[in-house]
Image: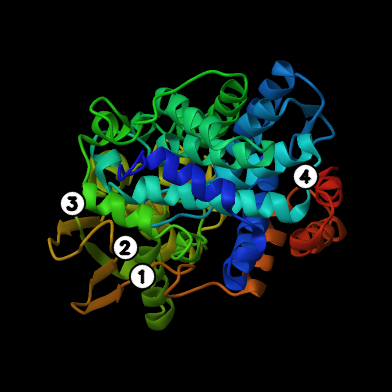
């Protein structure tokens, strides 16, 4: 090949297949175990919801070899079908991690794929954890190459990049050759998809996106290992992924992301969510919470709420404003900043209970939501910045204002291990006992040295 630069797919494949857990810095490995725990808590909680039951029933009907466990169930199915359900569960409550500037949810795909394929193959804990890290790094970089461009073309970034992440995880655990993983990535480009029309009515398709992406990535891996081919120029080609889904890409930006493989760990900059809703909204919600607490605000004191926002999130969180002020159901409310701010200002919290369909019809909350509006601020460099700003005009003439420059749970304002464990217990405790939750925590903590995934899988089974 002489001086020819290898393709993006080959460079990603080479990195993933050469990755060993002992080569990954200790803080990155620790954060990866936090990601495992957070993802599993979200998945367990989702098993009690209608969408979760539908995903589990579908995976069970698809069946296949009894090789991979469905979360919260004794049932085992083919790995590709297990991830269809488990990744849908992990993302379904919008409580899972986000890589903010890529706007990608990584754990729902990489962690569930690692567990399902690792269980099917009898992989060790260290091998599985290394594969998961590799999958996260691939997902982040594929998304970071074109920040904001997928959403601008009406696609959900996780739905698009997740299939490559799942193929990275599955390919590494299967022991794929470099050529096989390159072909799997090529196949993934033709399986990527996922539009954001769920924003119109709060239906469930966004929840499915990581499940379908993980399923597609596992299938692409199996196809490539059986000799099926895909284009090596899948990312940068004239008819490739970036031109199709993002309208083009910055060659130098992609090159820098590929060059940093193994030196910069994008996983370190993941954000864990304190609220089960769209992560862009979190800094705004924190601002509202502080204003409520510091000034002991009552809802009837509030004349108007105004927020400054970049233009990027407007079509997802603000418009059409009338519809966002009266979300039709709990899932739609997760993507409505008028509702999210109002529920914080009225109730002082926004947990899973605040997104039940009955809760979003609360007339007091909707009354405040009707007084929430926004104005564009071109100085906010979204999606590189997730800034929150809330200004409240009180009926007595006072004006209160609060700003937050980063989401809580991210690299700048991290959640502690204790906070993440408390979040896990709150989620897992909806469906399992406290002792079983403790067993999961212990198994995840020991994943880096575990001979197999048996202990963790057993702890997740009712």
Q: How far is mark 1 from mark 2, CA to CA?
A: 6 Å
Q: In front of the other: label 1 or label 4? A: 4
Of mark 1 and mark 3, the one earlier in the sequence is 3
Please give the label number shown on residue 311. 3
Are dots 1 and 3 in contact, CB under 8 Å? no
Residue found at the far front of this picture: 2
Q: Secondary structure at mark 2?
A: loop
| Residue sitting at x 40%, y 67% | 407
The residue beneath circle 1 is 406
Q: How far is mark 1 from mark 4, CA to CA?
A: 38 Å
Of mark 2 and mark 4, the one earlier in the sequence is 4
The residue beneath circle 4 is 123
Of mark 3 and mark 4, the one earlier in the sequence is 4
Are dots 1 and 2 in contact, CB under 8 Å? yes
Viewport quadrant of the C terminus? top right
Give the answer, above or below, for where 243 lies relative to 24. Answer: above
Are dots 2 and 4 in contact, CB under 8 Å? no
The residue beneath circle 2 is 386
Q: Secondary structure at mark 4?
A: loop
| Residue sitting at x 24%, y 42% | 319
Q: Secondary structure at mark 3?
A: loop
> Percent from the top left, x then y, of residue 265?
47, 63
Give the answer, above or below, for where 402 lies relative to 164. Answer: below
Of mark 1 and mark 4, the one earlier in the sequence is 4
Q: Is residue 70 left or right of residue 374?
A: right
Give the answer, above or below, for where 229 lies relative to 360. Answer: above
| Residue sitting at x 65%, y 60% | 21
Residue 386 or 331: which is nearer the viewer? 386
Viewport quadrant of the N terminus? top left
Q: How far is mark 2 from mark 3, CA to CA?
A: 12 Å
Q: In front of the other: label 3 or label 4? A: 4
């Amino acid at each position: 090949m002489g001086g020819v630069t290898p393709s993006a797919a080959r460079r990603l494949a080479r990195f993933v297949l050469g990755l060993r857990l002992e080569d990954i810095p200790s803080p990155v490995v620790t954060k990866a175990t936090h990601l495992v725990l957070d993802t599993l808590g979200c998945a367990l909680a989702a098993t009690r919801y209608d969408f979760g039951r539908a995903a589990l029933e579908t995976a069970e009907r698809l069946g296949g070899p009894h090789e991979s466990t469905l979360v919260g169930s004794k049932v085992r199915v083919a790995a590709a079908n297990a991830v269809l359900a488990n990744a849908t569960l992990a993302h379904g409550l919008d409580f899972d991690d986000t890589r903010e500037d890529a706007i990608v949810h990584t754990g729902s795909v990489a962690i569930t794929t690692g567990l399902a394929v690792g269980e099917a193959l009898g992989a060790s804990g260290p091998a599985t954890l290394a594969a998961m890290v590799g999958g996260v790094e691939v997902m982040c970089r594929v998304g970071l190459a074109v920040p904001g461009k997928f959403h601008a073309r009406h696609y959900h970034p996780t739905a698009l990049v997740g299939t490559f992440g799942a193929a990275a995880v599955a390919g590494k655990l299967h022991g794929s050759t470099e050529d096989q993983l390159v072909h799997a990535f090529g196949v993934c480009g033709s399986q990527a998809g996922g539009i954001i029309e769920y924003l119109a009515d709060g239906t469930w398709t966004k929840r499915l996106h990581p499940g379908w992406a993980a399923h597609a990535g596992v299938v692409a891996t199996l196809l490539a290992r059986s000799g099926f081919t895909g284009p090596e120029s899948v990312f940068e080609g004239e008819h490739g992924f970036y031109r199709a889904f993002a309208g083009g890409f910055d060659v130098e930006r992609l090159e820098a992301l590929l060059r940093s493989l193994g030196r910069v760990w994008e996983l370190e900059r993941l954000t864990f969510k304190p609220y089960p809703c769209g992560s862009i909204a979190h800094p705004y919600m924190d601002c509202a919470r502080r204003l409520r607490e510091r000034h002991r605000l009552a809802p009837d004191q509030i004349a108007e709420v105004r927020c400054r926002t970049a233009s990027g999130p407007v079509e997802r969180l603000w418009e059409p404003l009338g519809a966002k002020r009266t979300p039709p159901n709990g899932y739609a409310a997760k993507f409505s900043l008028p509702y999210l701010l109002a529920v914080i200002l009225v109730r002082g919290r926004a947990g899973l209970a605040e997104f039940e369909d009955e809760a979003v019809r609360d007339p007091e909350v909707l009354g405040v939501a009707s007084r929430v509006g926004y104005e564009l601020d071109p100085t906010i460099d979204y999606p590189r910045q997730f800034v929150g700003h809330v200004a409240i005009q009180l009926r007595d003439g006072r004006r209160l204002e609060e700003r937050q420059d980063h989401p809580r749970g991210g690299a700048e304002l991290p959640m502690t291990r204790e906070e993440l464990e408390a979040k896990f217990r709150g989620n897992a405790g909806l469906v399992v006992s406290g002792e079983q939750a403790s067993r999961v925590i212990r198994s995840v903590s020991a994943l880096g040295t575990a001979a197999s995934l048996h202990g963790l899988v057993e702890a997740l089974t009712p």
